[in-house]
Image: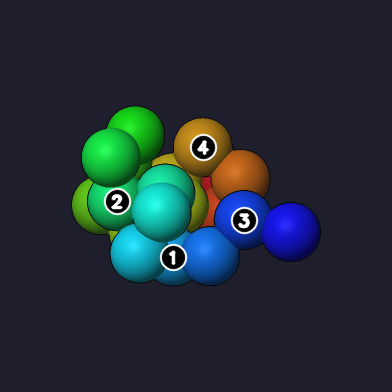
Amino acid sequence: MADPGMMSLFGEDGSLFSE
């Protein structure tokens, strides 16, 4: 769904979804 590269904008590497 959301790639780590995309999530980089929000956190380090999807910290929002990665806990």
Which image quadrant for residue 6?
Answer: bottom left
> Which secondary structure, mark 2?
loop
In the rendered image, the residue lying farthest to the bottom is: 4
Q: How crowded is mark 4: few (under 14 residues within 10 Å), some or many (20 or more)?
A: few
Q: Which mark is residue 8?
A: 2
Q: In this view, does 9 lie above or below 2?
A: above
> Which secondary structure, mark 1?
helix
Q: Which residue is drawn at 28% across and 40% down?
A: 9
* Picture coordinates of residue 17, whole percent (x, y): 61, 45
Disc 3 target residue: 2
User: Which label's residue is closer to the chain start, 4 or 2?
Assistant: 2
Q: Which residue is drawn at 44% across and 65% down?
A: 4
Point out the image quarter for the N terminus. Answer: bottom right
Tell me, yes or no, whether the two marked residues, 2 and 1, touch with CB atoms within 8 Å: yes
Tell me, yes or no, whether the two marked residues, 3 and 2, touch with CB atoms within 8 Å: no
Disc 4 target residue: 16
Disc 1 target residue: 4
Q: Residue at x 51, y 37 (%)?
A: 16
